[in-house]
Image: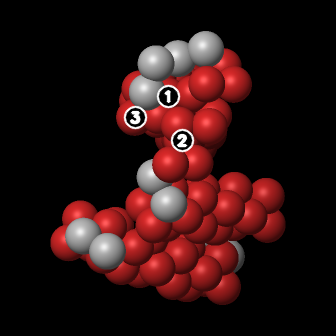
Amino acid sequence: MTVIQVCILFFAGFAITRTLFQFKRGALTIVWFLFWVIFWFAAGLVAVTPQTTDVIARFVGVGRGADVVIYVSLTALFYFIFRLYVKIEQVESEVTRLVRKLSLDEFRKNKDD
């Protein structure tokens, strides 16, 4: 096993323990917990047996296994960035709504005094 394989395997194990910690804290739902555990397990598996990505590459018609990993990773990253953007927009809208409501409530309170 090469040094990079050991590093990736160690990091995957570390990430799984952190994911478990976040789940126990209530910061992750069961769906996201399972997603991340499966993701990190798969990352460790691919690090130990990189030839698995070559099989997937041949199946989808891509030249090398590393290319498949890059394509899937980029697609997933852009999807998660999109989800974060949507969530940030929702939070900003909610904050704006709350600030307006608090301002109106404060104005009405001061007006009545």
* Scheme of colours in the image: secondary structure
Front in this rendered view, residue 37 or 68? 68
**Secondary structure beneath disc 1?**
helix
* Few, some or many residues within 10 Å of mark 1 (<14, 14–19, 20+): some
The quarter of the rendered structure image containing the N terminus is: bottom left
**Secondary structure beneath disc 3?**
helix
Q: Going 53% across and 76% down the picture, which residue do you hit?
A: 16
Q: CA distance from mark 1 to mark 3?
A: 5 Å
Q: Which mark is residue 66?
A: 3
Q: Nearer the viewer, mark 2 or mark 1?
A: 2
Residue 87 in view here: no
x and y percent of residue 86 in the render? 57, 24
* Few, some or many residues within 10 Å of mark 3 (<14, 14–19, 20+): some
Q: Going 65% across and 76% down the picture, which residue do you hit?
A: 23
Residue 53 in view here: yes
Q: Going 69% across and 25% down the picture, which residue do you hit?
A: 59
Are dots 2 and 3 in contact, CB under 8 Å?
yes
Q: Going 62% across and 37% down the picture, which residue do you hit?
A: 55
Q: Which mark is residue 53?
A: 2
x and y percent of residue 9 in the render? 40, 73
Q: Identity of the amino acid at label 2?
A: Thr
Q: Identity of the amino acid at label 1?
A: Val
Q: Which mark is residue 68?
A: 1
**Secondary structure beneath disc 2?**
helix
Point out the residue furthest to the left here: 3
Q: Identity of the amino acid at label 3?
A: Ala
